[in-house]
Amino acid sequence: MNLKELSTKLGLSQTTVSRALNGYPEVSEETREKVRRAAEEHNYRPNTRARSLATGRTMAIGHVIPVSTKHEMVNPVFGDFIAGAGEVYSREGYDMVLTLVEDNNEEAAYRQIKSRGSVDGVVVHGPLMDEPRIPLLKKIGLPFVVHGRATNAVDPYSWVDMNNRRAFERATELLLDLGHRRIALINGLERMDFAYRRREGYEAAHHNRGLATDPALMCSHEMTELFAYDTTSSLLSEPNPPTAFLVSSMICALGVRRAIEERGLVMGKDVSVVTHDDVLSYLRNGGDVPIFTATRSSVREAGRKSAEILLQMINDPTRDPETVLFEAELVLGQSTGPALVRA
Amino acid sequence: MNLKELSTKLGLSQTTVSRALNGYPEVSEETREKVRRAAEEHNYRPNTRARSLATGRTMAIGHVIPVSTKHEMVNPVFGDFIAGAGEVYSREGYDMVLTLVEDNNEEAAYRQIKSRGSVDGVVVHGPLMDEPRIPLLKKIGLPFVVHGRATNAVDPYSWVDMNNRRAFERATELLLDLGHRRIALINGLERMDFAYRRREGYEAAHHNRGLATDPALMCSHEMTELFAYDTTSSLLSEPNPPTAFLVSSMICALGVRRAIEERGLVMGKDVSVVTHDDVLSYLRNGGDVPIFTATRSSVREAGRKSAEILLQMINDPTRDPETVLFEAELVLGQSTGPALVRA
DNA sequence: AAATTCATCCAAAGCGGTTTGATTGCGGTA
DNA sequence: TACCGCAATCAAACCGCTTTGGATGAATTT
């Protein structure tokens, strides 16, 4: 059923039917109601492609997901972010189109997206410190919002981020307060902006108290359970092992815990762990009492917020870039305790 | 830059330029080359919407993701499935459009997808035993392939699945061979087809040896770490606790392990665990020696295969439905051992 | 030399909507 | 009565592409 069929069936012009359904005032309420009922009855829905060709709006948002070429890794955070954004999109009648791109030729991907004209805007995932995509998108004039930030970007742009630096600074302070002096940092890839900021926070907390950081305790890698396990294992078997771990994701924290417990050590007593918790739906941090002491910030909420901002920008292109900075909550769990005095 | 502009710039008709770029033979190689170069130079890319309006093909595939209304849960397997499918789509020039739908009104979602005409076909995720979407899609004539199966479906349809029944039957046999007689089943929601089949396998292995199953040992729920932990904890504190656990996902297995180790028990010695492993990119089952004994089947591979089949169906609608059944590999890890003789 | 064939190219008609710029009929005013 | 304004409706243009059904001229055949 298309507009033409529907309108002849009603004995009206396409114009009138279209206007009736789109709420234009030049149509009497009586006919509008008639049209509405007929559309309902025949399950008529305007063809997206035709409509977007006519209006110039596609009613679709693109998400470009970087896939690690090296490890074929898809960020596990992604599902929940999408879920948050998707809520907003479906409420506003937008589609979400995904493009998976190997992390080495993203630029071409964005160019293509723009010239094919299949979306009204994009969400940029996984920004690096030096993020070429931001000036690129500015240049080609595709509305966008970044999930995260790019430290070295010069011009203003819209982003939604968590205060990674502050979160990890506070987490480190907590561990320092508990008497820990050798705190390992199990971080993500530090060319990723969030990981860089987290290390800054970690270092700042040390420096603020006149403490030095030990490069041997700071690890950076793709955040898999296995990497965290391996790293923790080897750190713990060194002569002067860390007494605490500051970890970048729940998945990694599971690996850290495995390494700790495998040695017969008890988390929260022998070794302390603080992790960041993205509040993933399938990986809640325990029940009433969290297992892990954690910096907590919902990535689903970030998804919602990003989507909202992007749609606003699309509806009013003159708007100034908007930014949202979530502060992570620091929740105390069972994985932290005072540093043991070394024998 | 659009076709019209490009063609006037070249002093050719739109027809010729379009044909040149789309490889039609009615164009001399000389002009074709000229056109190609000009298109390249001006970074011309045909507008997707316009093209699809003209051809009737949208060059996009829909994925409808059920989101649990109760727990706002997004299946963690999803990211890797998408990654696999995405490989195929981008190779073939297809977009992927995602629709998140609360699991109570999926039918409306599919109807809308069809009538809005924004995709050429869909992948159905998370089929139930009685799956209303299958007859629905057949009726409305939208090509589809199901990731998984629907036991009670009558007409043939395309699907890509893992042999859940056989996998769990073998896993159970392994545990029975090791002398375990009280094997707990930590399963997904059993209205989901995969979970139902897994239970069948588990039961079949028992019955084939004349053993009864104990309903108290079979649990079914959304597969979160927390559910697995809670369930395992309470099972282990009963008077006649299970000596082995058969688990439906790695995420759950992590919860099972936590509960086991929290009690000071050792996995693979005091309690055995076999899990299913979807080979998620961020959650590999250990290094050289797997941590968990597991039934292993790559969901990314399933994504690839599903995409391939769907594209074939779209290219040739007369094709008969195609089905692919992956056999899970049974890999031995450190989490299984002979049942201890009860004191 | 006329008739065919063939390789190239083009004008115009869709695809299914939205939107511009009339047109119509009616009650109210001069 | 003639005119105006207004509400309600419509025909046709347009969005950017593909594709049908010619047109053109050179090469080949008769």
Image (tube, coloured by chain):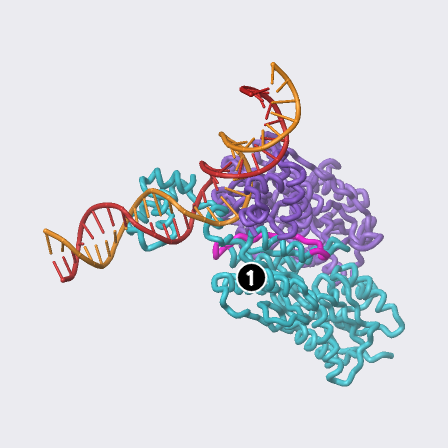
Chain colours: A purple, B cyan, C orange, D red
Q: How many residues crowd around disc 1 within 10 Å: few (fewer than 14), some, or many (20 or more)?
A: many
**Is residue B185 left or right of A160 when viewed as pictured?**
right
Looking at the image, which is closer to me, B294 or C22?
A: C22
Residue A5 rendering spot, x and y as whole percentages: 55, 50
Amino acid tagged 1: Pro
Write down the region rendered in magenta: B90-105
Residue B343, by quadrant, is bottom right
Residue that extends furthest to the right in the rendered view of this protein: B239
Q: Which residue is drawn at 71% across and 54% down?
A: B102
Q: Residue at x 57, y 43 (%)?
A: A12
Question: Disc 1 marks which residue?
Answer: B143
Looking at the image, which is closer to me, B132 or B179?
A: B132
Residue B20 rendering spot, x and y as whole percentages: 35, 49
Number of numbered markers: 1
**Is residue B313 left or right of B334 when viewed as pictured?**
left
Residue A206 rendering spot, x and y as whole percentages: 72, 40
Q: Is residue B277 visible?
A: yes
Q: Does the magenta stretch include residue B264?
A: no
Whether B160 is drawn above or below A112: the answer is below
